[in-house]
Image (cartoon, rainbow, N blue to C red):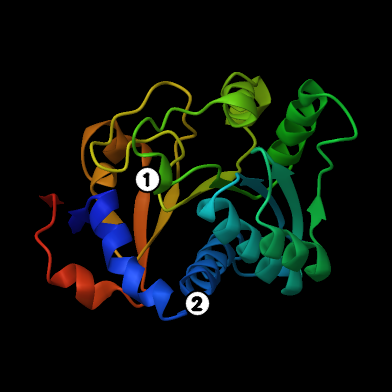
């Protein structure tokens, strides 16, 4: 597997975004398919599953929200936990229209939202980590509410026995996309769904241990990446 830097990925995306190609929609559809594949099994249809989505402020949060909309439209019970300063408006609207429940951050304290996030995650079949992505490559360590939710989950005794699968959007939040460096506030993923090409940080450093199984979803930038020299190759 070839691993690319965040700069290489963004460069490959640029012309496609300027041309108006729906890269986020392609990513979200692939993410929803991957989550569905994890939570459904013989005798258990998607409509009986529960999915908790941790959605941050950036494009990863947008990917997660549109995937939440797709999963809700297919029949899954979806709870969205906003953990950033805002939510991608189009993604939020799509998720709510499809029937997902978006927790209201303004109706109580941050401590109350963390508690509700932990409860939603524990009773879920899958937790989608869409807190932050490659846009924070200068210092990807989690902060604020996103960090509080992750730390609370990791320290919750019931979490380890919940059976919930963690699906990281593009890379586990808190992992450096280029080096794989990370501190202790990262949700280890069972599956990382990454878009266009694997990020180098998924294949080396601590990121390689935290990424779980890696699935690359094609979004239309693959030929552009093939012309580049990867940062790491395994």
Mark 1 vs mark 2, foreground winner is 2
Residue occupying image coordinates x 49% and y 74%: 26
> Is residue 219 in view from this perspective?
no
Q: CA distance from mark 1 to mark 2?
A: 27 Å
Residue occupying image coordinates x 37% and y 76%: 16
Q: Is residue 89 left or right of residue 21?
A: right
Q: Position of residue 72 (x, y in %)?
A: 74, 66
Q: Is residue 154 above or below residue 12?
A: above
Seen from the viewer's position, the closer of residues 162 and 75 is 75
Q: Is residue 50 left or right of residue 128?
A: right
Q: Is residue 148 left or right of residue 179?
A: right
- Location of mark 2 (residue): 22
Q: Position of residue 14 (x, y in %)?
A: 34, 68
- Location of mark 1 (residue): 212
The disc at residue 154 is none
Q: Quadrant location of the N terminus?
A: bottom left
Q: Position of residue 41 (x, y in %)?
A: 59, 66
């Amino acid at each position: 597997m070839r691993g690319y830097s965040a700069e290489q990925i963004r460069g490959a995306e640029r012309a496609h975004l300027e041309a108006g190609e729906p890269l986020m929609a392609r990513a979200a559809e692939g993410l929803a398919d991957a989550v569905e594949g994890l939570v459904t099994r013989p005798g258990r249809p998607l409509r009986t599953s529960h999915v908790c989505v941790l959605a941050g402020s950036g494009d990863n949060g947008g990917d997660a929200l549109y995937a939440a909309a797709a999963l809700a439209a297919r029949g899954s019970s979806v709870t969205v936990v906003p953990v950033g300063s805002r939510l991608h408006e189009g993604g939020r609207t799509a998720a709510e229209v499809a029937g997902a429940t978006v927790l209201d951050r303004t109706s109580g304290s941050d401590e109350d939202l963390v508690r509700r996030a932990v409860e939603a995650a524990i009773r879920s079949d899958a937790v989608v980590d869409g807190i932050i992505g490659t846009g924070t490559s200068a210092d990807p360590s989690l902060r604020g509410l996103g960090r509080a939710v992750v730390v609370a989950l990791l320290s919750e005794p019931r979490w380890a026995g919940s059976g919930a699968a963690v699906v990281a959007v593009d890379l586990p939040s808190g992992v450096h996309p280029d080096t794989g460096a990370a501190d202790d506030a990262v949700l280890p993923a069972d599956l990382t769904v990454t878009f266009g090409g694997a990020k180098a940080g998924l294949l080396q450093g601590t990121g390689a241990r935290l990424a779980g199984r890696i699935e690359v979803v094609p979004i239309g930038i693959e030929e552009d990446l093939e012309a580049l020299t990867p940062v790491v190759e395994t």
